[in-house]
Amino acid sequence: MSSLSEELFPIGFNEFDMMIEGIRLLYKSENGMNYVVCVNDSDVSGIKDIEAVEGLKQNIAETLSHTSITTYEYLTIIIADDSASVRAIATTISNCWLIDRTNRQLIIYENQPEDFANIKHIIEECVYGREQKAGKKAEIPKPKASDIFNFTNLLIVVNFIVYACTVMGAKGNVSMILYKSGALRPRNVIYGGEIYRMFTSMFLHVDASHILNNMLCLFVFGRILEKEWGKIKLLAVYLLGGLGGSLLYCASYRITGTDSMAVGASGSVYALFGAMIVLTVMLPELRKQVNGTTLLIVVFISLFQEIIFGQNIAIEGHVGGFITGAILAFFIQNIDNLIKENKEQNYIR
């Protein structure tokens, strides 16, 4: 970040010491106009969401109000190793450029200024290198392994492997095969102590349509939540949501007496659905990513399952998973917000 900032000194920019790690504030006056550039190395400063960036902007405005720079044009430049983690900022707030440090890219979205105080070419030279800027063809960044080998895809693969090893190539009674493989039966759990069935059942599926429906939902929700939360939290909600669905299904046995076998990842998938709904309420930037098409896919799949499986759907598992996912999302996101607030208070003072 220091080299990027220092490249602006020769064209008249000066630095204002903000005393915030990862933040450099540059300014210059030209033809009666003041230009202010805030360079935010988000991986150092920890300022990675819209609220934090807006808070920093207000902090800078308050600081500048005590100087001769009272009216000015303002640009935020965010540097990040993973541009996806801060993309929502650059597509939402005004006058914001994004630098992907890993792939050496300057990213300027359509709603942002194409240039600012004639510094674009200087920043491009810093990011791409002078040789590439002079005419050398830039190397196209290769996709990261994490874009392919993420937990969402891994969970989908695991479910299909289990399906292939149990039902797909099986000969004989499918119900018996599922039972022996660990399908959920409340009586076995409550009276037989076979607690493991609450876990193993979430990886078993009856037929191709059953697993395809669940895996499509997992693909839609899992990618969104993994991008927002990371692998560990996604896996925790997936597994705990499935267990929550199994727990409610077993609890309902004490009321209804229904002891039918239950299998499928529906409890886990509905946990991700519940978590996503809570997050879209709590995070304004996520609402821009989750469009109506995503929700229509969910409604369609749910109706399709209802029509195909009818009475064989364990609705308690769906409800239990949904509630568990929603509760977990609420607590996880509130804890994340507290951690971010504490980190920002350590930097902005």
Image (cartoon, grey):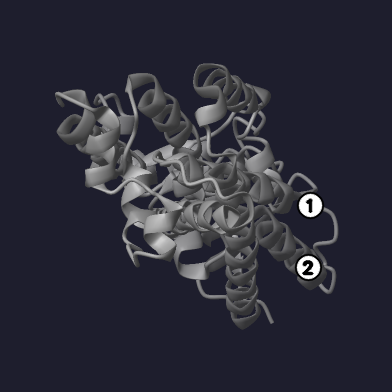
> Callout 2 environment at 10 Å: few (<14), some (14 to 19), or many (20+)?
some
Residue 15: x %, y % from top left: 59, 67
Q: Is residue 13 above or below residue 116?
A: below
Q: CA distance from mark 1 to mark 2?
A: 10 Å
Residue 101: x %, y % from top left: 37, 49
Closer-to-camera residue (243/344) = 243
Residue in the image at 57% along x and 17% along y: 307
Of callouts 1 and 2, the N-terminal one: 2
Q: Is residue 122 visible?
A: no
Residue under label 1, please give it.
Answer: 72
Query: Pointer 1 and pointer 2: residues touching (CB < 8 Å)?
Result: yes
Residue 199: x %, y % from top left: 35, 55
Residue under label 2, please give it.
Answer: 64
Quadrant position of residue 142: top left
Closer-to-camera residue (5/180) = 180
Kind of residue sitting beneath label 1? Tyr
Secondary structure state at the residue bearing disc 1: loop
Tell me if 253 is positioned left or right of 51 in this view: left
